[in-house]
Amino acid sequence: MHAAMFQTPFMPPTRSARETFTWAVEQAVVCDQAGLSEYWIGEHATQAWESIPNPELVIAAAALQTEQIRLAPGAHLLPYHHPATLAVQIAYLTQVTQGRYILGIGAGAFPEDAALRGLKDLTENHRMVTESLEIMRRVWRKEPFQFEGDYWRAGYPEAPEGHPLRDVGLYNGTIEIGLTGLSPNSPSLRFAGQNGYLPLSIYSGDDFLRNHWETYSTAAQEKGRIVDRSVHHVVRDVFIADTDKEARRWAIEGGMGKAWQEYVLPRYHNYGILETMIKNPGMSADDVDLDYLADNVWIVGSPETAVEKLEEAFAATGGWGTIMMYGYDYIDNPEPWNHSIELLSREVAPKVSLPA
């Protein structure tokens, strides 16, 4: 299993933009040095806790300070960008990163982000994603085109000869794309399966993970695509320390616990997600607290405990290829958090494998 980080970021509103930006870049460097395979940065314009509106800025800064790790927006919300502008920006970053780039895309889940752009609801967003991708592909082909769609117009009369489009596709032959899914029978993951994109699952229970893989793999098979579970990315809450006691304390009393207590728990409660995480019969969402999460939902503990929990999860779900740990605020005392990253990469992930 590979290890990666999803830097949402879960940063409290008391942090300044400079603090959040600096932490995100520094964490990319830590993850690179620890041997993580990928580093994804969220894009949100109106969320107090998920407060990076420009992941491409973090990617550009991190590209100059890292060597191996692949960098990705997680994700560019396509309905809220002009696709031709975004296509050029992406092409540029594939070169700045020297091919260490994955394009994460999404339709947008927060009504506030849509309202900011003058969109009254989200009903057209998935159609906008399809049209946006069509325009971006035409830009990347570097051939003359004119496009007039339902949402955008784009084109150029003759193929551009110079920077930054000239080397599109130079690295890895193409631009790899990934989509994130949360809901059951996720339309985003179905779309990913149909088009050969990477599937990312936000963890909301083992049943959901099984459903997500079935949704993705079925859609891929319908299009004649052969896929295996090694492409499946799963986002989990992870804190690993030398002992179970240390890990539990740093998770509950640190940035992870603060974010869940003040932001994630209320949102998941409102969206009905907590119910899907409960393993105890008769337990209600109102009973879910940080202690329950640490023991039953998060991957928290020593390396040995973390391996055991992940092996149990693999047995229950069929497994996946990359675990993506959420990023949290440990700015005031980063050593335990950075040690957790290293332990996940070096002591846990290599010991967990997909069934033969």
Image (tube, rainbow, N blue to C red):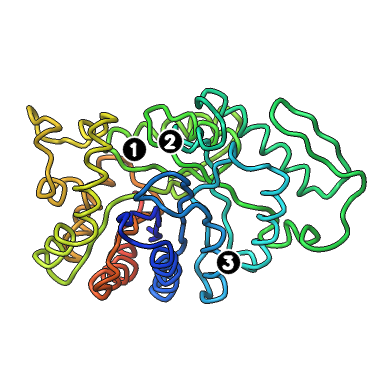
Nearer to me, 351 or 234:
234
Farthest-out residue, top: 123
User: Label 1: how many residues lie within 10 Å, few (<14), some (14-19) or many (20+)?
Assistant: many
Residue that badge 1 annotates? 209
Report, in whole angstroms, how far the alpha carbon at label 3 lies from the one at label 1.
32 Å
Question: Which amino acid type corresponds to the residue marked 2 in the rendered image?
Answer: Phe
**Which element carries disc 3, helix, strand or loop?**
helix
Label disc, if present, on residue 60 of the rendered structure? 3
At 85% from the left and 62% from the top, the residue drawn is 162
Question: Which amino acid type corresponds to the residue marked 3 in the rendered image?
Answer: Ala
At 83% from the left and 41% from the top, the residue drawn is 155
Do the numbered discs 1 and 2 sit on residues whose CB atoms are within 8 Å? no
Label disc, if present, on residue 165 of the rendered structure? none
**Which element carries disc 2, helix, strand or loop?**
loop
Do the numbered discs 2 and 3 sit on residues whose CB atoms are within 8 Å? no
Residue 142 is situated, as x and y percent measured from the top left of the image, at 83, 50
Question: Which amino acid type corresponds to the residue marked 1 in the rendered image?
Answer: Leu
Label disc, if present, on residue 110 of the rendered structure? 2
At 44% from the left and 73% from the top, the residue drawn is 29
